[in-house]
Amino acid sequence: MKKISVIVVDDSALVRSLLSEIINRQRDMECIGTANDPLIAREMIRERNPDVITLDVEMPRMDGLDFLSRLMRLRPMPVVMISTLTERGAEVTMRALELGAVDFVAKPRIGVANGLGELASQIVDKIRVAAAAQVRRAPTTPAAASETTAAAPAARPGQAHAALSPAAVPAPVSATTLLGRLSTEKIICIGASTGGTEAIRHILMEMPADAPGIVITQHMPPGFTTSFAARLDSLCRIAVREAVHRERILPGHAYIAPGGRQFRIDRSGANYVAVVEDTDPVNRHRPSVEVLFHSASRVAGRNAFGIMLTGMGADGARAMREMRDAGSYNFVQDEASCVVFGMPREAIAHGAADEVLPLDQIAAALLAKLRGGGDQVRHRI
């Protein structure tokens, strides 16, 4: 069996040594080189053509994000970021995922040697996933594209209701009158893992300001979901925030499961509310998509829409089938547009999908269902 070849890029000699040792202990991978800055790494990548690289952010001679941006434009390849558990580290990691990094590992605040040793299984698991991921070439000018996208919601405020309003409705009819009750009754539930941060961004940026409440579980460790939510909030017409225990889930808002805690929905009278708990991992995850989707099947039934996006494993597949059995309408991302097809594949295998679509068609299909009043008319898969 061909081993996964890895190049480690980090300015710390200790980190390079530890990562090399962790990688070389695995029967299915080997570290074929280390570099202490991106310029050395660039030449090493050309010469040795690795399957995966691990990349630190703050390095001499060239910032890790600049290097990643150039790499994903000129020679796209799987990259696992080695991030720091700080506010700055979380923000930079979110930007790295936008630029095309497959995933990241968060360095703990404790000593580097002990911390990376404890994370060994997580590191090698993420390298394995990255080696099998579908990596796409980044836009020619990612910074400019990001700035244009970020300005779009403010530049087009009049589109907030137009996206949900039926085309045949005459202009004098208020879209708010037509959809206010629907947006309150319906709820959209999204689950994702590897590659999911960008997939979620893609969908949320298509959501109009009067969309139903959206609840999201993205596999992510503590310390990173706050930055993730803030980044999305700056880009979207809807408000995006980290979920808070017992807050009401409102139309025009999206709520991200806090890293390291379980997130589900409940009812308080006629309203949906967020439940954030320090309960055990489910399917080895906390937050777990299974927990969120199971609660949607119980609490929302036919008023729910489920969306399963890119990710490794099977978390949420059984509960998504429970949602469908309870009357929800479910969209699953197709293989060609996934970074990793694991979770969507399992959802399809469990009979949970009503429609299997490319990422760039899911939001439009969802809005079309809402324009039609949200009736759960099944498609044959």
Image (cartoon, rainbow, N blue to C red):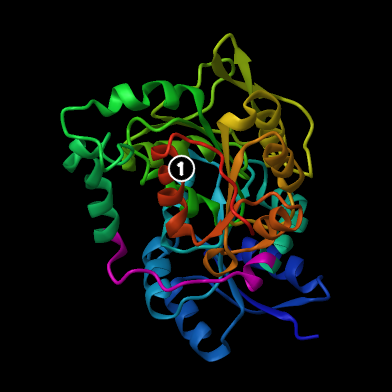
Disc 1 marks which amino acid?
Lys
Instruction: Kindly give the residue lying farthest to the top in the view shown.
Output: 269
Quadrant of the image for the C terminus?
A: bottom right
Position in image of residue 326 (x %, y %): 70, 33
SS assignment at label 1: helix
Can residue 19 be seen by looking at this rendering? Answer: yes
The residue lying toward the viewer, choosing from 280 and 48, is: 280
Is 328 inside the magenta-drawn segment? no
Using the rendered image of the protein, determine whether residue 57 is visible from the camera's viewpoint: no
Residue 160's image quarter? top left
Quarter residue 380 falls in:
bottom right
Asked if 149 appears above or below 229 in the picture, the reply is below
The one of 35 and 355 positioned closer to us in this rendering: 355
How many numbered badges does the structure rendering display?
A: 1
**Left or right relative to 338: residue 209:** left
Towards the viewer: 352 or 369? 369
Majority secondary structure in the magenta region: loop
Say which residue appears at 27% left-offset and 67% top-offset: 141
List x then y, in percent, for residue 5. 67, 80
Pick whichever, 338 or 256, lies toward us.
338
What residue appears at the point 51 percent right and 17 percent down from the top-left corner? 248
Q: Which stretch is magenta?
A: 129-143
Residue drawn at x 54%, y 52% is 196
The answer to whether 117 is drawn above or below residue 320 in the figure is: below
Residue 133 belongs to magenta span: yes
Residue where numbered disc 1 is placed = 369
Q: Is residue 90 above or below residue 175?
A: below
